[in-house]
Image: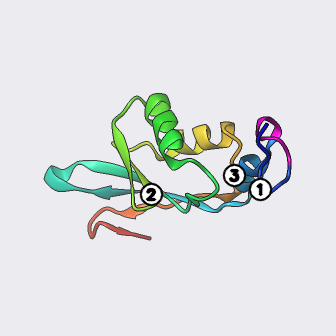
């Protein structure tokens, strides 16, 4: 039986990931990429506490889109800001710490 180094509980009962989800500040915004396509970017998730690849897989399935995890952030194809917030809140992230940023359409900059 393995024991978690952080909380001292067995791996089956480990609560480190749930605690980490509640404390992290997550930013969700869109950017324009090549050929005018929108990408939803999710950043601020600590890769050491949460399995970012598994989270990416779950978000892609719930939003019915393609995407990837690069450089500590999740990139989803399309505009899925509201849906991502709902899914993250259902997965245990605090909805107060999920920040949705709007983009200035003319200059392609975040406000």
Residue 82 higher or lower than 58, as above or below: below
Q: Residue at 60% across / 59% down in the picture?
A: 48
Q: Earlier in the sequence, mark 3 or mark 2?
A: 3
Instruction: Provide the residue span drawn in magenta.
Output: 9-13
**Front position in the image: 14 or 25:** 14
Q: Secondary structure at mark 3?
A: helix
Residue topped by disc 3: 21
Q: Residue at 43% across / 35% down in the picture?
A: 60
Residue topped by disc 1: 5
Image quarter hosting the C terminus:
bottom left
Q: Earlier in the sequence, mark 3 or mark 1?
A: 1
Q: What secondary structure characterizes most of the magenta part?
A: helix
For label 2, the crowd category at 10 Å Cα-Cα, with few meaning under 14, some 14 to 19 and many 20 or more, is many
Q: CA distance from mark 3 to mark 1?
A: 18 Å
Instruction: Check if residue 76 falls in the magenta segment.
Output: no
Q: Secondary structure at mark 2?
A: strand
The quarter holding residue 2 reads: top right
Q: CA distance from mark 3 to mark 2?
A: 15 Å
Q: CA distance from mark 1 to mark 2?
A: 26 Å
């Amino acid at each position: 039986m393995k024991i978690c180094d952080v909380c001292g509980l067995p791996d089956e009962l480990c609560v480190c990931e749930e605690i980490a989800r509640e404390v992290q500040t997550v930013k969700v915004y869109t950017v324009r990429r090549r050929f005018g396509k929108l990408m939803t970017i999710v950043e601020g998730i600590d890769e050491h506490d949460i399995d970012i690849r598994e989270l990416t897989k779950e978000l892609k399935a719930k939003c019915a889109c393609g995407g990837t995890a690069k450089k500590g952030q999740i990139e989803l194809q399309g505009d899925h800001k509201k849906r991502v917030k709902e899914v993250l809140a259902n997965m245990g992230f605090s909805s107060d710490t999920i920040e949705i940023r709007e983009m200035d359409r003319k200059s392609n900059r975040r406000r």
